[in-house]
Image (cartoon, coloured by chain):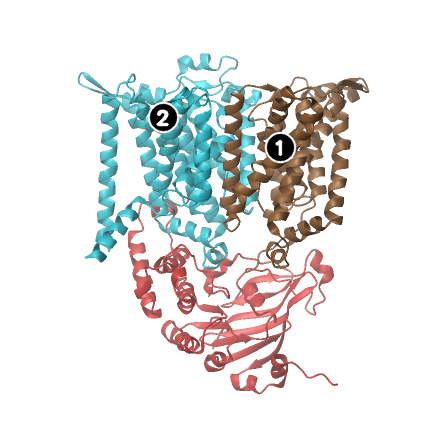
Chain colours: A brown, B cyan, C red
Amino acid sequence: MDLMNTVLPYLLSGISVGGQYALIAIGYTMVYGILRLINFAHGDVFMVAGLIMVYLSASMPLYLAVPLMIALTVLLGFLIERAAYKPLRTAPRMSVMISAIGVSYLLQNLALYITGGLNKNYPTIPWISDPITVFGSPTKRVTLITPFLTVALVIVLVWLINHTRVGMAMRAVSRDFETAQLMGIRINNVISVTFVIGSFLAAVGSMLYFSNYPGVVPTSGGMPGLKAFVAAVFGGIGSIPGAVVGAFIIGICENIIKGLDIILQAVGVLKEPLELATFSDAFTFALLIIVLVFKPTGLFGEKTTDKV
Amino acid sequence: MITTRKKTNLISLLLVAAMLALVIVLDQVIQPTDSMSMLLKVLQKGSIYALAAVSMNLLNGFTGLFSLGHAGFMLIGAYTYAILTIPSEVRDVVYQYYDAAIRLSFPETLGNAMGPVGTLLGVVLAIVAAGLAATLVAWLIGLPVLRLKSDYLAIATLGFAEVVRAVFQWGKLGPVTNGSNPLKSFVRINSFQLKLGGTTISLTTFVPVLLATVCIALIVLLVNSTYGRSFKAIRDDEVAAEAMGINLARHKIMSFCISSFFAGVSGAGMAMVLGIAQASNFKSAMTYEILLMVVLGGIGSISGSCIGAMLFIAASEWWLRGLDSGNFLGINAPGIFRNGFRLVVFSVIIMIVVLFFRKGIMGDRELPDLFKKRARKEAAGK
Amino acid sequence: MSSILKVENVTMQFGGVVAVDNLNLEVNEGEIVALIGPNGAGKTTAFNVITGVYQPTNGAVWFQGDKIVENHPQGKMKKLYKGEEAGSYTHVLAPTPDKITQLGMARTFQNIRLWKSQTVFDNVLIAMHCRTHTNFLAASFRMNHREEQEQRERVAQLLETVGLYDVKDELATSLPYGKQRRLEIARALATDPKLLLLDEPAAGMNPQETQELTAFIGQIRSDFHMTVFLIEHHMDLVMDISDRIYVLDFGKLIAQGTPEEIQNNNRVIDAYLGVVEDA
């Protein structure tokens, strides 16, 4: 029971963070599935969503600010695709990836300029930010809500992809870009929808994520973005369930590692702390490298071969 | 044809020598209080970034391996150099929270034995060690990672750089790396002076420029050798390269290791210029910046990378400074021109280059090519 | 006449699809041998097995008396494989394509794969890289000056022979189609092979270009004492220059022999024209 009390808080925040990563990871995995592009700017869209919320909530009530924030984030995602990726449709993949890095750089610098580099306090959203206790460990309600909300959104999304026209078009485009185009699917619309969905989920994710953190800074998007991408790769890029499973695994592992010193001491394995928490970020990437080397297509990915 | 090649080589050599001489002169003429002193700062930082950009270009532009692990290798280089050059009397001050494990200082030991020449030799050895440390790590990580294809390789190397950063910040390695605290008080660029009779010649700017020039020259030699040509063949068509007897694994890892060697050296150079080595400075943002320099100059052009790096540093540190301090090109608007605006304008410029001038400044040509073309045009005109 | 290449019981299976089925063939030194067959018969797959691009599911390849490739069904393939020769091979020998090239086998590609940013001259020069003995440091400091000079002279000579010397400084991809094919052959010759494998060298050529190519292949044989093994669809070319022909259909060898024998072989005619089913 003592061990349970030590592990539980880390496990809880792991599940919560995992859900937030999952919402970002879906954006990565969908874009990659269709454009074969690592959208490096996605993490920054997530950060900008946080900032928009900070500024909006200062001037209007929350019931207006939240939908407006989501709408603006979706617009941002849409505009980024149109301005920075669409002109490079026929360019080599490396150029598009560089463009994505450029957009990420631009968004971060823009955020730096607007905030003056200061930490912006995220507004307290009533109810979901309320403190609660789960099995004796204090946390915020958002921790509990996140996994359920994530799973619900994913179910809706998967249903959309499997049962609507645009979903079918998406599946067709991700299977074969050129052929889908020849079949009369409007590629640009499909891609835009993908970015809209991705940005929407990132906006929801940012609301959940930043409620648990003290505030937003221009570099806030970088790490969660990268980790969500790793989650997408881990689950097999292009696969939505894969991204979700990957995100939960990474979120939980990362948080367990944060508390590993304390947990191991509680179990009695360790006599003194090893400062393993330093590796909570690094672990994710080490995991990534291992997965890529041994199963490059991830847990649920499909195998592709080159033709000679 | 062969004589013209020799002539171009000779001219290039003379130009480089003239440039180095000019740098020494500038170093003496410009005082730290001058408004032009920014030029020296740009030359110091820019040349190191140029080396970093060229070494990245060797991998991304010439071998076609899209790797984003550069900051990691630079970090390894910077730390190796710093650890090996901190003088023993300040070592305990630098490692204030730890008991320093490595107590050897190359410049000091060799300097005691051989005088000033020994000190210089010690610094050179420490720089080489910085490169070799990065190469060793590159070799270890390259074996598994280089089998990955384009964007998977990019993300794996990016992740690797993050792992390196975490390892160097790990408290348990504190006796070696000083944990998350910076390393300082080692031999830096302004330690270099030449005493001729009564006059002291400052080599502060000359040293980083020379370091970068020598290393870039080595990379040029490699690129134009039979190995460099094979790298380009791998970039153009991997399957054909393999079918023509080029061992892909061996050449890729070779390119990766050589690129990392020079990344390590540029990391050492960076430490020398900044006077500080701290893991938190070598984030993926640094890799992105170097990548953007390469893109700005033209992927696959060495002179382009140098120009790109110099422009990047000059623009962000010097020319666009006014955008941050309220006054730019005579326009005074402190409301808009405040902290951070410079970087916004700068990133917009970068995006314009990425979107509309995809080939960058040089494309895949080199500086001498431009003159050749002109000569040919003139010949045709006659 | 000694055998230079021997393909022994080679089967190549992609999942349930059998692309090459228990193929046996032999090429002797100095011969020009053709491998023909309808589209999708498995010709290029056979080439890819010989040159190490694919690892066969079962069988072996011999080159100049040495076994260079060998495999037997493993893993998932073990269940799927229904070949007669299962069990005759026990070892795995799977060199990468570059190793095979270094043994003295060079190939061209069906869809031209030149190094597009390189000049004609450099395309051929790079192919000589696999024969250099200098390490990268020595090469960087130009300690291989003599070797490099020698190589450059050989490239010039080679380009002269194939008639591309006057375009040596052009970009490879700026050449007309027929010349690109020639350049691919020149590039393969630069690796100093004993056996040249040509994958549809006349694809996309007009009759006149095809005729030139026929003469060119003959010239290569006499000038370089080369053994040539080719895949081709142009029957004129094949019948003109081949000493012997193998015919592949649905992955299986259906006929072999001299051009005359093949021309009069009913099974070959059926394979190409299709059998009229009984109504």
Residue C7 location in percent, x, y? 57, 69
Above or below: residue C141 compared with residue B33: below
Q: Position of residue C119 (x, y in %)?
A: 36, 57
Q: Position of residue A99 (x, y in %)?
A: 50, 40
Taking the spot 39% from the left edge, 17% from the top edge, the residue there is: B87
Picture mark count: 2
Mark 2 falls on what kind of element?
helix
Determine the residue positioned at 36% across, 21% down: B188
Three-letter code, disc 1: Leu
Instruction: Please identify the quadrant where the C terminus of chain A is shown.
Output: bottom right
Residue C198 seen in this snapshot: yes
Relative to C253, does residue C105 appear above or below in the rendering? above
- Report the amino acid beneath label 2: Trp
Q: Which residue is mark 1?
A: A72
Q: Which residue is drawn at the image coordinates 59% and 35% (left, top)? A: A76
Disc 2 target residue: B318
Chain under label 1?
A
Mark 1, Cα crowd under 10 Å, few <14 / some 14-19 / many 20+, is some
Q: Looking at the figure, which quarter contains the N terminus of chain A?
A: top right
